[in-house]
Image (cartoon, rainbow, N blue to C red):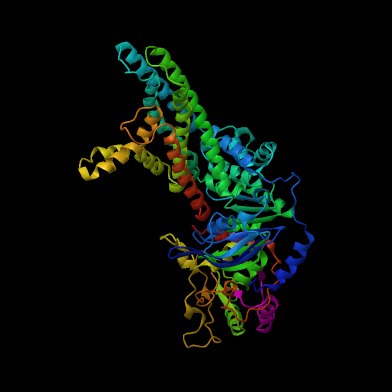
């Protein structure tokens, strides 16, 4: 169990971590997400007592790391920097760490086997690839067979087999009752690995909830509605009815409609009410990637200048929803085109209150948000959404 | 927590309650300074820098020491009653630069590679890590310097059989004494390395510490500065080192075992400062 209370770290005028409070529980993989420079690594270092917090404190099992009895047997860590002397062989590196922590030397060969480096154990680690270095770091973390494990970007540089292995390793470690705290900026990876998510941006806590809750709270689930192609007037009629009922409608390139803000049964009822046949009415759940980008937009410190995403996360022009005459109810019958890429960025959570107390940034823009339309309904339908997100050049 | 999603809290509680904490089957015993020393020995012996710097030092001490003796013997130069041990000084002075480098690298390479974070995660006690490094490094350089200095001294005495016979005290000073002094100089470098955290910077500082006092003293001609010049010369590291061999550039200043006390003081200050900084500073 890791517990941070009011954790703050300032470097001069820059606040790297700002009043961060969270708990990491045993028996689950907790993902630690945030854009580059959001304070993930600083937080990790403070947990390990390497950096001293400016304010607040963080404890592991009730003790600050530096006064933890038998610290290396309780906590294992892989930090983002390789942290290996390149001139030393993998085995000697691990051996020195094992000796330092009072761990039997036989354990070294054991962990070398676990991470699959036994064949290169006697080679100097300067010749290691990024992935091998990462495996060596994971071996060092596992050395003490600890109860709490911290991994900073563990899948960096790993091949697909390695990523798969790390994913299973994390889950297995958590299933054994350990506390596993993994930082990453790979959303897709966290969606598969983590049970719980802690999201920070600019050092502040943005969200602290389970992965499923995170997705449904932060993303716009939508319903895809398709009407027969032979009746464009049906389409207009249905669109008007949906908007009148408080839903939001976007038109997809294929002719289908994306509806948010209305539960599926209600859409069906409305369609029935205005006598429109439906060819498709399906629930779609946004991927973790979308949810994350929405949450952290505006809190990204380092954004590439050729930023294709800016056009995507921008809200669709306001007047597209409302009607030039003013009222929300009598919106244009013809729905707005979905942006070309098919990447639907849901309306932003209103002007974000500057020091947004984390989860308040959930969809404020949809006040009449109804209960979710059976999120588990169609697992396969989530796939296309994710594919689209992964096309994002970043 | 601030999470608005209460259902997740309901789900988590029983989950956390059902699972017991993981307990490792590997017996846990508290790590000690002895473990840290074993670890530092593994680190020191497993990098090439150790072999190179100490190898170069031994080579320098042997070649310079023996060559000077051979040159003097060939030229029939009179040592004016001095024991032949004095000739070891030149090799040791050159070799000290290697010890400085190794001392700085012992801690500096941890910072330059990021290994220090791994080390301090495996052992949160900064004092223990630094103490282990100091003990291992000091022991290694002391043994190697003393042994080499002894070998050189014996060879020189054999080559220059006409020189005065050194007393037991002189033998001790120019072997064990020199070993202590050079290893102490290495410890000072280690302390500076821990304070500066940058290998090149620390090595430069240490070379300055060794050479600058003499260089500065060279330019102090004014009468007002006479006492400063004298102090700089007397307490310069080369002069103190040669005091161990019984020859100094001035008639006053540290002599006999006194240079070792001076070095001990310097080392205490440097290592004390390093511990204080390591404890306070972010890694």
Does residue A61 appear left or right of residue A13 in this picture? right
Please report the bounds of the magenta region as a residue range: A259-283
Q: Nearer the viewer, residue B161 or B147?
A: B161
Q: Quadrant of the N terminus of chain B?
A: bottom right
Q: Quadrant of residue A303?
A: bottom left
Q: Which residue occupies 71% across, 67% down?
A: A377
Q: Which residue occupies 74% across, 53% down?
A: B22
Give coordinates of residue A210: x percent, y percent: 67, 65
Q: Which residue occupies 71% across, 66% down?
A: A376
Q: Is residue A385 above or below residue B79?
A: below
Give coordinates of residue A213: x percent, y percent: 66, 68
Q: Quadrant of residue B90?
A: top left
Q: Examine the structure image and report whether residue A260 is included in the region drawn in magenta.
A: yes
Q: Nearer the viewer, residue B77 or A182?
A: B77
Give coordinates of residue B199: x percent, y percent: 43, 42
Q: Is residue B180 above or below residue A318?
A: above
Of all residues, the one furthest to the left in this rendering is: B222
Q: Examine the structure image and report whether residue A390 is included in the region drawn in magenta.
A: no
Q: Does residue A283 appear in the picture of this structure?
A: yes
């Amino acid at each position: 169990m890791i517990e941070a209370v009011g954790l703050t770290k300032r470097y001069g005028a820059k606040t790297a971590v700002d009043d961060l409070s969270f708990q990491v529980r045993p028996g689950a993989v907790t993902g630690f997400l945030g854009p580059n420079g959001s304070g993930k690594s600083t937080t990790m270092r403070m947990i390990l007592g390497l950096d001293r917090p400016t304010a607040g404190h963080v404890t592991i099992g009730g003790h600050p790391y530096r006064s933890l009895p038998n610290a290396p047997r309780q906590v294992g860590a892989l930090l983002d920097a390789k942290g290996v002397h390149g001139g030393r062989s993998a085995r000697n590196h691990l051996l020195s760490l094992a000796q330092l922590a009072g761990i039997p030397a036989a354990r070294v060969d054991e962990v070398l086997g676990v991470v699959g480096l036994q064949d290169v154990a006697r080679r100097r680690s300067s010749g290691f690839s990024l992935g091998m270095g990462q495996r060596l770091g994971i071996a060092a973390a596992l050395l003490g067979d600890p109860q709490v494990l911290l991994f900073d970007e563990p899948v960096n540089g790993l091949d697909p087999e390695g990523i798969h292995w790390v994913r299973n390793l994390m889950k297995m470690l958590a299933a054994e009752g350990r506390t596993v705290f993994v930082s990453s900026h790979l959303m897709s990876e966290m969606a598969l690995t983590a049970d719980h998510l802690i999201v920070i941006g600019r050092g502040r806590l943005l969200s602290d909830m389970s992965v499923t809750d995170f997705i449904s709270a932060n993303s716009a689930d939508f319903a895809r509605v398709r009407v027969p192609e032979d009746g464009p007037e049906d389409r207009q009629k249905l669109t008007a009815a949906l908007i009148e009922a408080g839903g939001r409608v976007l038109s997809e390139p294929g002719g289908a409609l994306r509806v948010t803000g209305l539960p599926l049964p209600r859409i069906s009822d409305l369609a029935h009410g205005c006598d429109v046949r439906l060819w498709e009415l399906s629930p779609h759940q946004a991927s973790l990637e979308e949810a994350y980008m929405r949450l952290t937009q505006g809190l990204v410190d380092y954004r590439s200048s050729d930023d294709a995403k800016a056009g995507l996360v921008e809200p669709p022009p306001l007047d597209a929803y409302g009607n030039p005459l003013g009222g929300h109810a009598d919106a244009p019958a013809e729905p707005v085109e979905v942006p070309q890429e098919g990447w639907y960025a849901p309306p932003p959570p209103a002007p974000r209150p500057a020091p947004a107390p984390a989860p308040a940034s959930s969809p404020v823009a949809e006040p009449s948000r109804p209960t979710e339309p059976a999120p588990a309904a169609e697992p396969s339908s989530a796939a296309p959404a994710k594919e689209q997100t992964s096309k994002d050049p970043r | 927590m601030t999470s608005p999603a209460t259902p997740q809290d309901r789900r988590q509680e029983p989950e956390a309650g059902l699972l017991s904490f993981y307990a490792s089957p590997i017996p846990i015993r508290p790590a000690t300074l002895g473990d840290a020393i074993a670890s530092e020995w593994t680190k020191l012996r497993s990098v090439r820098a150790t072999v190179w710097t100490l190898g170069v030092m031994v080579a320098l001490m042997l070649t310079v020491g023996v060559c000077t003796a051979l040159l003097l013997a060939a030229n029939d130069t009179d040592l004016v009653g001095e024991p032949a041990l004095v000739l070891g000084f030149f090799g040791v002075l050159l070799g000290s630069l290697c010890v400085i480098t190794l001392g700085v690298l012992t801690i500096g390479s941890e910072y330059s590679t990021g290994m220090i974070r791994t080390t301090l995660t495996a052992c949160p006690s900064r004092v223990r890590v630094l103490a282990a490094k100091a003990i291992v490094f000091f022991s290694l350089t002391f043994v190697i310097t003393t042994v080499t200095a002894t070998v050189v001294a014996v060879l020189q005495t054999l080559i220059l059989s006409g020189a005065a016979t050194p007393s037991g005290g002189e033998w001790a000073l120019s072997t064990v004494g020199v070993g202590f002094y050079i290893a102490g100089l290495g410890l000072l470098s280690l302390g500076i390395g821990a304070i500066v955290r940058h290998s090149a910077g620390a090595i430069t500082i240490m070379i300055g510490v060794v050479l600058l006092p003499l260089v500065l003293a060279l330019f102090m001609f004014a009468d007002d500065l006479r006492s400063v010049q004298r102090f700089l010369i007397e307490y310069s590291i080369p002069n103190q080192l040669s005091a161990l061999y019984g020859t100094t550039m001035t008639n006053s200043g540290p002599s006999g075992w006194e240079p070792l006390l001076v070095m001990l003081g310097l080392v205490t200050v440097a290592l004390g400062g390093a511990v204080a900084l390591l404890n306070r500073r972010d890694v």
